[in-house]
Image (tube, rainbow, N blue to C red):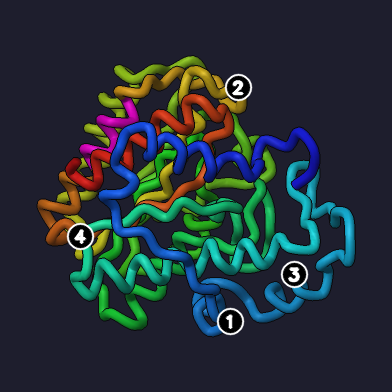
Amino acid sequence: MGPAHPECFQRVDVITDMLMTLRVLDMLAQFDAPAVTREELLRVHEAEYLDFLESIIPESGYRIIDLDTSMNPRTLQAARFAAGSVVFAVDQVMHGKTRNAFCNVRPPGHHATADTAMGFCFYNNVAVGAAHAIAEHGAGRVAIIDFDVHHGNGTDAIFSGNDKVRFFSLYERGLFPLDGSTSLAGGGAYVELPRESGGDEMRQAVEQGWKPGLDAFRPDLVMVSAGFDAHVQDDISSLRFSDADFEWLTGLVMETAEKHAGGRLVSVLEGGYDLDSLARCAGAHIKQLSGL
């Protein structure tokens, strides 16, 4: 997205490097992502929006979308593979070829609404995957658990009023996009944490705000918007999560999947911009998912 932008290509590289350091990369099944199809995107995005994005691809340099988001000549190509990887992961999990999957992708997606790109996001990757699970695999109850420090407003809005999808969101109070420019859709289970909150506050709030709803919903597929930007080392937020807190959250989503969905879980990278803490926490997240 431009020089010195936090949403940089190194984000996916440091995760792969950490998996090598942990000596688990060669023990994981790895796949190159296919590109998402227009039909798959149309389940959650408006046709006019998809056409608009195609029409503004710059021949060189950058096209400014908003203060934080820009597009270069290959941005949409990357976004197609990011969304396509989630569709592929859903297929693998729903066909029983693997119990769970992690999509190490960028750009992120959970801020993209049906008709607007924002917050580094163009296509809503996790929403595309959830809609695919419903349309192609007959999923009746998909839980989307979003522990990125920013509220996933795009996902929230896309599935507002949809009885087959329940959205569980954790986020810092007053942080983008809930800074006066947008509001909660109102249909999800929301855990809002004040600035400077740490792991103890988060765990108590999640136990009270998420667990009863997850058990009542009984999802047959769990999808995760896995953002690691609430870490104390990440300057993009003011929350103070530790590595152990993300391990606890990973345990929660795995427990939910085991209890209700036969272990079926697809996790998708969202935020996390301090490369050191991102590598550690995402690497541990993937290792924990794999059971290694």
Residue 70 location (% of width, % of height): 78, 51
Q: Nearer the viewer, residue 271 or 130?
A: 271
Q: Disc 1 to disc 3, how far (Cα)?
A: 12 Å
Magenta stretch bounds: 245-252
Q: Earlier in the sequence, mark 1 or mark 3?
A: 1
Residue drawn 33% across the image and 82% down it = 136
Q: Earlier in the sequence, mark 4 or mark 3?
A: 3
Given the image, on which type of amino acid does mark 1 rest? Answer: Arg
Residue 91 location (% of width, % of height): 32, 73
Q: Disc 4 to disc 3, how far (Cα)?
A: 34 Å
| Count of numbered circles on the image | 4
Q: Is residue 225 one of those drawn in magenta? A: no
Instruction: Report which residue position mark 3 lands on.
Output: 53
Instruction: Report which residue position mark 1 lands on.
Output: 38
Numbered label attached to residue 235: 2
Q: Is residue 118 above or below residue 172?
A: below
